[in-house]
Amino acid sequence: MNKEISEETLFEGPRFNVVRKKYMSEKDGKEYIRDCVNPGDAVVILTVENDEIIFIKQLREVVGTVELEFPAGMIDPGEEPIDAARRELEEETGLIAGKLEKLIDYYPSCGYSSEKIYIYLATDLKKGHVHLDDTEEIIDICRVPIDEAVKMVMGGKYRHASVSIAILMYYYKYKNGGING
Amino acid sequence: MNKEISEETLFEGPRFNVVRKKYMSEKDGKEYIRDCVNPGDAVVILTVENDEIIFIKQLREVVGTVELEFPAGMIDPGEEPIDAARRELEEETGLIAGKLEKLIDYYPSCGYSSEKIYIYLATDLKKGHVHLDDTEEIIDICRVPIDEAVKMVMGGKYRHASVSIAILMYYYKYKNGGING
């Protein structure tokens, strides 16, 4: 691993900060920089009831579209990822998960962002209460049968990385003979 | 869609810039901001030869680890994604793809980043020439049988979103029944 020799915060905003780190190459001693976005970590919840997957339609200003995606949100400081998943699911859909299982955690963009995303599978659902943040705008909630959702992934219809990963992992784990690592 | 009312660049670096946009809610007229990272778009290449997938080990300073991932890189201004995939594959592995097929394009982090990633499947390979950028540090190239790679995805062993999506899509399309959307 190349050695980190300095670190400087170049931007601070409400959603993320940007830190510039300087490194020295182990190989030839050359110095170089890497700018890194630190937005914190997030949870995404694949919610399944009666062989249907629950989606939300959400306005995504930064890409200029309304995206079909899963309930999701930031992990609060000190909060366990599984607790964030339980909280976000109820806040956004009004559903309480009786069972939460981690499917995967991954880096969405590890070339420039430290963000880590945890995907949970939520089942055994009960009714709770919706309570959205002021800044959240959920346009609609809808349900899609699992087989149809898999075809949508394969046809490139979902544009959110977490949706594609979650649906295919669920399919292979629970619908297709049970491939496990 | 809520109306964009102003835009300001708050940070400019070699890898990305940060733009703050102000919007007005259609619903209640309230103003709010969204900070957006603009790192450009990227290609990721799933390379398959003799039922084996080609991986590279790359140092990822921003998450502090060496990651097992696919050949990948930025799309140059004016470059078509498929041409970027062909170029990056040869630069990083020395392989020329006789056939390139788009598997999917997606947003890795559309809450704060405009980045779009295009995943291509490269097959029908010939030998070309490796030529890495100064800033790239590829530690090793290795090959993993497809069935083993799928088990690795399902066991949460890959931490790069693009790797998990690409392997599961390839497996579904070419190894497990061939259902398409």
Image (cartoon, coloured by chain):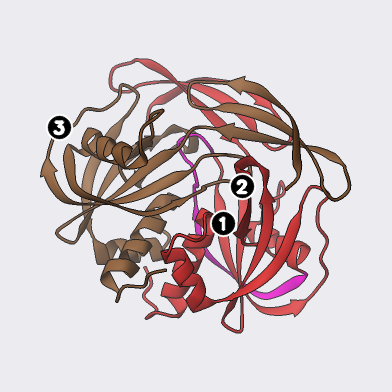
Chain colours: A brown, B red
Residue placed at 55% from the left, 48% from the top?
A: B116
Residue B112 sits inside the magenta stretch: yes
Query: Nearer the viewer's eye, disc 3 or disc 1?
Result: 3
- Whether labels 2 and 1 belong to a single chain: the reply is yes
B66 sits left or right of A146 in the view: right
B144 sits left or right of B77 in the view: left
Distance between mark 3 and mark 1 Cα atoms = 38 Å
Q: Position of residue A39 (x, y in %)?
A: 51, 32
Q: Quadrant of residue B39?
A: top right
Mark 2 vs 1: CB contact within 8 A? yes
- Disc 3 marks which amino acid? His
- Whether labels 2 and 3 belong to a single chain: the reply is no
Where is mark 3, residue-wise? A129
Q: Position of residue B149 (x, y in %)?
A: 51, 71
Mark number for residue A19? none
**Which residue is situated farthest in the top direction here?**
B30
Query: Nearer the viewer's eye, disc 2 or disc 3?
Result: 3
Mark number for residue B41? 2
Mark number for residue B118? 1
10 Å neighbourhood of mark 2: few (<14), some, or many (≥20)?
A: some
For disc 2, the chain is B
Q: Position of residue B75 (x, y in %)?
A: 68, 51
- Please provide the residue range marked out in magenta: B94-113
A143 sits left or right of A7 in the view: left
Considering depth in this image, is A173 or B49 the residue closer to the camera? A173
